[in-house]
Image: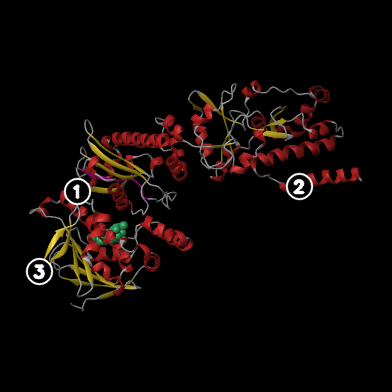
Amino acid sequence: MEKVNKETYSFQSEAKELLHLMIHSLYSNKEIFIREIISNASDAIDKLRFYFLSHPELNKNSIDFNIYVSIDKKNNTLSISDNGIGMSKKEVIENLGTIAKSGTKKFISELKRNTEEKNKLIGQFGVGFYSTFIVSKKVIVKTKSINCSKNEGVLWESYGKGEYSIQNIKKEETGTEVILFLNDSEKIFLEEWKINNIIKKYSDHISIPVKINSYNEKEKTYSFKKINKAKALWSLKKTEIKQEEYQNFYKYITNDINNPLIWTHNTVEGTQEYTNLLYVPSKAPWDMWNRDNKHGLKLYVKKVYIMDDVQQFLPNYLRFIRGIVDSYDMPLNVSREILQENKIVSGLKKSLTKRVLKLLKELSINEPEKYQKFWNEFGLVLKEGIAEDLYNKETIANLLRFTSVFNNKSEQTLSLESYIKNMKEKQEKIYFITSDNYLSAKNSPHLEFFKKNSIDVLLLSDKIDEWMMNHLTEFKDKKIQSISKNDESLNNLIQEENKNQKIFEKNNFIKKVKEILKDKIKEAKFTNKLTDTPAVLVTDSADMSTQMAKLFSAAGQKTSPIKYIFEINPNHLLIKHINNISEKKQLKEWIYLLFEQALFVETGSLEDPNKFIFRLNNLLTQKIFTIQ
Ligand code: ADP
Ligand code: MG
């Protein structure tokens, strides 16, 4: 080997970190390095096939694509080679010396924090090429890019510590060979049966033949034997595919170590011809809420791989769906730009969306427990659909799950349908309350009336809920009503009357309250909704709700302060007491205390908490003096 042109480089620091973490934490699942190398080889071949579509002159003899696996027991090496697109020197440095993927930094810090979940996290991330160092003391990559001449091959070599070296070599064939010098303790990976098993397990369904250099005892010769089926899984008939094969294919395309929850596999003929194989994962990926989270489907056109992560086939609120679409109508030279405004794509999006929603609906009916698992993982994302997808709103609303007063636990398990089934005789609306968290929703004073009358109320406390409920005002002809908003129709349900009406009227109580609070409130009135609470604040039906105002302010947007309707409980002892106060200053202090209490409960904060505490302490002190 020529050593003259050898150059040594240091791994990018993130790459170093990942290497270290991986070698020390992936021990229980080390065989996946084979899956990773084969998947890279298969990607490289897919890329070359795609490249040939625009450079047919380069593929005169129609290359036969293969991945070859060779075992060398004498030298303890396992080598995997492909005749794919290969890499130039620059690409080798970029691809094997750095981690180009966005979000890696976050991933690494997550990995450090989350020791128990390490294996899972790494599984989701797709460890890639570096996984070879779990089992190897040294790795050599020989490669030549389709864009370089045969003198311009590159040899990359590393011991997986801090550095790698690169030298120019002559390499006749375009493609890549990865040679693993296995650790002495990993000789098991030199056994043909072992390699066969692993490849069958992880790579059976990839469309490129994987061939192993097999020794024939009788003839004492070596020959390459095909290990995998080498047929695109989705192009087979459903009846020919085993459950396990579906699951393995999912793992192969997603790098997830968990099995998918469910999937749907369809071939459609007619105006649009396509095959889809769509999976619902069983666990949400660690980066689902990252802005740069990669999602979308793998696109094939007539079984030729075109590209990954195509987001145009499904709406954003279904971004957790993984899988492939193979279109028979799209042109082979389709680009990301074309996809943006392609009619075939928008047609496909419509039908794939329907298909996924149908899949979820059936799951919710036939396997509610499994559906609950789905909801716990992805419910928050699905909720976005209520605002996003007008056309399928009713279907999505049917899929929503809530917690409620009667539910009595924070897990969201109640559907709108079952809420309706349990409605009281005179009840016409579906009631809900939004709050910052489950407990504050559950203990809200707005609920007093409903609890007393055994009317269930949905308790919503996810960040997105306020926004979602703004778009969900009706379900199956039933109005959906926030109980922290003014609702005249409630009067029909209220039987009790204000027993102290006359005394209050004589004192002009409401008028006094209004005079004291002036423009701090929109309106003041008595209510019979309350039992244990002296007063609450509600927003007028057309006004912005408290939760919505909080959302705006969290997003840094200014809104004018809410003017509340002040609802007072005439049957409460405290109110009766206040009604009897004639001294003006005293009365003002009490009314302010009531108002600020109610404001605190409604909004969770006060503009000037010191003032509130001061007022409270003053009144308490006076009380003590009177008792003494
Ligand atoms: P990923 O495959 O997820 O991109 P990997 O760590 O597995 O990450 O590989 C890093 C990159 O190295 C690939 O994206 C590809 O560009 C390049 N690469 C790896 N193996 C090959 C190969 N056999 N042929 C061509 N390029 C390869
Ligand atoms: Mg890879």
On the image, which quarter does residue 102 sit in? bottom left
Q: Tag 1: residue type?
A: Lys
Confirm or deny contact between disc 2 and disc 3 (CB under 8 A): no
Residue 597 visible at all: yes
In the displayed structure image, the side of residue 102 where residue 138 appears, left or right? left
Extreme residue toward the bottom, this view: 4
- Residue interval drawn in magenta: 294-301
Residue 559 in the image: above or below residue 427: below
Q: Tag 3: residue type?
A: Lys
Extreme residue toward the front, this view: 218
In the displayed structure image, the side of residue 100 where residue 69 appears, left or right? left
Answer whether residue 461 is magenta in the image: no
Q: Secondary structure at mark 2?
A: helix
Answer whether residue 296 is magenta in the image: yes
The residue drawn where x is 31% and y is 69% is: 135
* Residue of label 2: 613
* Residue of label 3: 220
Residue 231, disc: 1
Residue 517 in the image: above or below residue 248: above
Q: Earlier in the sequence, mark 2 or mark 1?
A: 1
Extreme residue toward the right, this view: 628
- The percent position of residue 628, horizontal first and vertical second, equals 92, 46
- The percent position of residue 316, horizontal first and vertical second, equals 39, 41
Mark 1 or mark 3, whichever is nearer to me: 3
On the image, which quarter does residue 163 sit in? bottom left
Q: Quadrant of the N terminus?
A: bottom left
User: CA gap, disc 2 to disc 1?
Assistant: 74 Å
Q: Secondary structure at mark 3?
A: loop
- The percent position of residue 332, horizontal first and vertical second, equals 19, 44
Q: Nearer the viewer, residue 561 or 245?
A: 245
Q: Tag 2: residue type?
A: Ile
Q: Secondary structure at mark 1?
A: loop
